Amino acid sequence: MAVITISNQFGAGGPELGRELASRLGYDYLDKEIIHKVALEVNVPDAEVAEFEEIHHNKLRSFFSTIFDLDALKKKAQVEEAEKAAEAKFDDRDSIPFQYHVDGWIDSEIYKGMITKVISALGQKGNVVIAGRGGQHILQDCEGTLHIRLVGNLEDRVARIAKHKGLSSTDAKKFVTTLDSRSRDYLKFYFDCDPDQPSVYDLVLNTSRLDIDKCADVVEGLIK
């Protein structure tokens, strides 16, 4: 039983490596499914959880949630989630362990608590590849966990994103630098850590030097 966490500079190929490793090892690859799990547990739309990953790295909303009557907001969130559930094609309550219920509201403190508990439970389950979301810090002391960081030259990462998303080089560079900054802010706010600190990881791979298949070979060799 093993757990792999993957952190990456944006455009360095983290999702590609995660999916390749999951395929080779027969593990579950969990990325957006983690957002879905949190949304199910707190009874809010997936999009609202995703917002906290993207832009709500502040305690303002958490403060307001303690002093206002939020019944109307909770009811709205419940209705939106019910509508979304009716259209959903899957429910992964069984594939991701851990039950912890907060009804119809999420703020920064709830988000951090939920992400920590869900990823901690995944660490206990094993045989999973976990994408981002501070997994390298949440599971830092979890036995049998391998923490991977992917990096790459900015020019290579920009070129990869430009090709993948059909952007100009200028727009792709803005996109990459914005997402890198957002990731640093996220980890600083929720876990008070620097994603570029190499001592956090068991292995740092440079995808400007190694392609995804070779990176997967290296990691697979460590697992097997």
Image: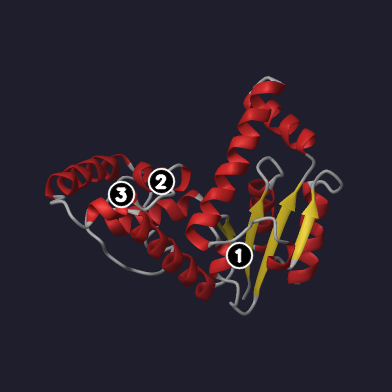
Of helix, strand and loop, which one carries label 3?
A: helix
Sequence-first tag of 3 and 1? 3
Task: Give the amino acid at mark 3.
Answer: Arg
C-alpha distance separating marks 3 and 2? 8 Å
x, y percent for residue 85: 28, 45
Q: Residue at x 30, y 39 (%)?
A: 87
C-alpha distance separating marks 1 and 2? 21 Å
- Give the residue at mark 1: 136
Q: Residues within 10 Å of mark 3 (few under 14, many from 20)?
A: some
Q: Residue at x 46, y 52 (%)?
A: 33
C-alpha distance separating marks 3 and 1? 26 Å
Q: Residues within 10 Å of mark 2 (few under 14, many from 20)?
A: some
Task: Give the amino acid at mark 1.
Answer: Gln
* Location of residue 198 by image quarter: bottom right
Q: Nearer the viewer, mark 3 or mark 1?
A: 3
Of helix, strand and loop, which one carries label 2?
A: loop
Task: Give the amino acid at mark 2.
Answer: His
Q: Which mark is residue 111?
A: none
Q: Residue at x 46, y 71 (%)?
A: 121
Q: Are marks 3 and 2 in contact (CB under 8 Å)?
A: yes
Q: Residue at x 48, y 71 (%)?
A: 120
x, y percent for residue 201: 70, 65
